[in-house]
Image (spheres, helix red, strand yellow):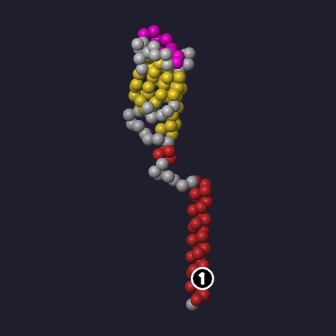
Amino acid sequence: MKNNRTYKWVRGLLAASAFSSVMFIMQACYGTPNYRNEESFSYEVKMSGIVTDSASAQPLSGIYVSADISDEVAVSDENGQFSLSFMVYNDSEDGYNLNFSDSLDRYAPLDTLIDSNFSDINISLAAK
């Protein structure tokens, strides 16, 4: 009788260690999911476009472009082109609020809501 009980105990101990080994390997390969961490569900949004003068349609350089949900800032080049990328942690059905401001204070700043499906943006700024 004692031999049978010992056999069950050893078998249970081996099963528990096998299960623990499998769980350790799974965690080592795939990590531990952290559902409370917003960064677990993040992705990068890339937007680019051209900033022009609303009156002359000429490209504007030196225009700061930023998104409300990020600290990233892009500056338009001599062709008015900019490229901005930022991390998104929560989906926004409305889109992203982009801010356009002139580094030389020649043009009125513009805040505009961009649809989340857009990647190429053409913006015209009005002179002050």
Give the prevailing secondary structure in the magenta stretch. loop
Q: Residue at x 45, y 14 (%)?
A: 106
User: Residue 121 versus residue 51: which sits nearer the camera?
Assistant: 51
The quadrant of the rendering that contains the C terminus is top left
The quadrant of the rendering that contains the N terminus is bottom right
* Residue at the farthest front position: 104
Residue 124 shows in the view: yes
Q: Is residue 52 magenta?
A: yes
Q: Position of residue 17 (x, y in %)?
A: 60, 70
Q: Residue at x 53, y 20 (%)?
A: 76
Looking at the image, residue 21 lies above or below residue 79: below
SS at circle 1 = helix
Specify start and end residues of the magenta stretch as a single range: 51-62
Looking at the image, residue 124 lies above or below residue 46: above
Q: Position of residue 116 (x, y in %)?
A: 44, 33
- Quarter of the figure with residue 99: top left
Q: Residue at x 51, y 40 (%)?
A: 43
Q: Is residue 128 magenta?
A: no
